[in-house]
Each structure stands twice: as structure tokens, then as C-alpha cells.
Image: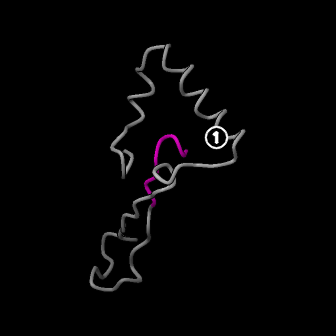
Amino acid sequence: MDGYVGLTSDYFLHACNELCVPVAILFMGLLVHSCIPEDLSISTVIPIPKGKHANMTNSSNYRGIALCSMYNK
């Protein structure tokens, strides 16, 4: 799931075929103008414990997983 907007891959997998054209136009515009809107570059970092038996009070026992926009991926 997208951490910022709340989109899941199901929205794209089960979308109608008409969605492909606007999304393709969006990506082409981003490539041509070499800019990305700030909303597409925001990620949410979620801390994940490194193991079941790790000391949860020690911050070095966590790794960060970034959830970014589906469009950014």
C-alpha cells in the first residue's frame, strides 16, 4: 500500500483499460518536462524489527522500509 496517498496495486490491476492513456500521458509529460510533483516524491518510512527476539527498546534493531507512491514506483 502507498504510505501517503493510500493506493494499492489492486487499483491498477483491476482498473479499466481507459486508465492506461491518461497515466501514459502523465508519465510522458513528467519525462518531457523533467520534473516530478512533490506529492509523487513523498515516502513514508516504517520501522521493521530485524528479528522476533530482538531487543525492541534498541533503535539499532530496526530497519526502515520506505512506502512510496505507486506512480513513483
Q: Which residue is mark 1?
A: 30
Residue drawn at (49%, 49%), measured in percent from left and top? 40
The residue nearer to you, when weighing 27 against 2, is 27
Residue drawn at (61%, 27%), measured in percent from left and top? 25
Which percent across, then down, holds residue 26?
Answer: 58, 32
Which percent across, then down, holds residue 66?
Answer: 45, 60
Looking at the image, residue 2 sits to the left or right of residue 20; the answer is left
Task: Give, as a three-letter code, the residue at label 1.
Answer: Leu
Q: Residues within 10 Å of mark 1 (few under 14, many from 20)?
A: few
Q: Quadrant of the C terminus?
A: top right
Is 35 rendered above or below residue 32?
Answer: below
Which percent across, then down, holds residue 68?
Answer: 46, 52
Q: Quadrant of the N terminus?
A: top left
Q: Quadrant of residue 7?
A: top left
Which percent across, then down, holds residue 28?
Answer: 67, 32
- In the image, which residues are magenta? 66-73
- Is residue 67 covered in magenta? yes
Q: Describe the element under mark 1 as helix, strand or loop.
A: helix
Looking at the image, residue 21 sits to the left or right of residue 52; the answer is right
Total labels: the figure holds 1
